[in-house]
Image (tube, rainbow, N blue to C red):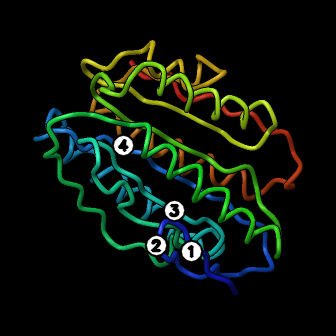
């Protein structure tokens, strides 16, 4: 088994290294507008996802979860580096930042994803990784920076190297989220009460991925949430 080091953070060793793995990254808004019910429901939904996947003795070893957070400019974006679902602790996010800067968190998510997948490819191989972004407001990054990171994500999507999904609630800017992906139908309008439904879909999708061949060109459409 191997460990990776990125940005001075060492991730957990890869379990069941001879099997194909899935890297799942959550990029989550912890700005102050998420206080109250939103952050409570988000914590519950993420923890329910972990519990759902831990019920499967194979999935808990071959799905690795990393969590990145974004808020004030200059904050530490890595809440949890990649670790097997089996090794994940209870998530307790706190919403307290006074702004919402997402670009650095996405940079970190892509960097960690690439490093983790390079480890998988020295063993059993890698399914296409996922990045899931959730926000309830407008990003405060410069528009050129949002476009730049969006072009990086779109290039990975075009090359078949990434599934990216964005979920926006409340006062989020749909145009900003759509600028991050080649697939506008991967951007979902919702509210905090829908977090459980969305993450249940993510969990069921992980099950579907795990039953496929690595080179299967699977497509995923997020649920229609009303």
> Which type of secondary structure does the marked residue at label 1 adopt?
strand
Instruction: Using residue 28 as the reference point, say whether residue 93 is left or right of it.
Output: left
- Marks 1/4: CA–CA distance: 32 Å
| 58, 78: nearer the viewer | 78
Instruction: Identify the residue position indicated by label 3 in the image.
Output: 65
> Which type of secondary structure does the marked residue at label 4 adopt?
helix
- Marks 2/1: CA–CA distance: 6 Å
Disc number lying in front (2 or 3): 2
Do the numbered discs 2 and 1 sit on residues whose CB atoms are within 8 Å? yes
Few, some or many residues within 10 Å of mark 1 (<14, 14–19, 20+) = few
- Marks 4/2: CA–CA distance: 30 Å
Q: In the rendered structure, which disc, 2 or 3, sits on the residue that comes first in sequence? A: 2
Quarter of the picture holding the C terminus: top left
Instruction: Identify the residue position indicated by label 4 in the image.
Output: 196
Q: In the rendered structure, which disc, 3 or 4, sits on the residue that comes first in sequence? A: 3
Instruction: Identify the residue position indicated by label 1 in the image.
Output: 5
Disc number lying in front (1 or 4): 1
Residue at the extreme bottom: 1
């Amino acid at each position: 088994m191997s460990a990776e080091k990125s940005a001075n953070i060492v991730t957990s060793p890869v379990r069941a290294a001879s099997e194909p793995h899935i890297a799942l990254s959550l990029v989550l808004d912890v700005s102050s507008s998420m206080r109250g019910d939103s952050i409570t429901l988000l914590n519950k939904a993420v923890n329910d996802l972990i519990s759902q996947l831990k019920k499967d003795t194979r999935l808990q070893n071959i799905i690795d979860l990393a969590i990145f957070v974004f808020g004030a400019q200059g904050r530490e974006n890595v809440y949890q580096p990649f670790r097997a679902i089996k090794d994940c602790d209870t998530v307790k996010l706190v919403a307290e930042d006074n702004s919402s800067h997402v670009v650095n968190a996405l940079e970190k998510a892509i960097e960690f994803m690439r490093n983790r997948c390079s480890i998988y490819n020295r063993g059993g191989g890698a399914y296409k990784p996922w990045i899931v972004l959730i926000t309830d407001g407008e990003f405060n990054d410069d528009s050129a920076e949002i476009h730049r990171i969006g072009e990086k994500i779109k290039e990975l999507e075009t090359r078949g190297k990434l599934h990216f999904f964005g979920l926006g609630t409340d006062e989020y800017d749909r145009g900003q989220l759509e600028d991050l992906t080649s697939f506008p139908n991967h951007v979902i309008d919702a509210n905090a009460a829908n977090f459980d439904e969305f993450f249940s879909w993510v969990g069921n999708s992980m099950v579907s991925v795990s039953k496929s061949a690595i080179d299967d060109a699977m497509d995923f459409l997020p649920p229609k949430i009303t």
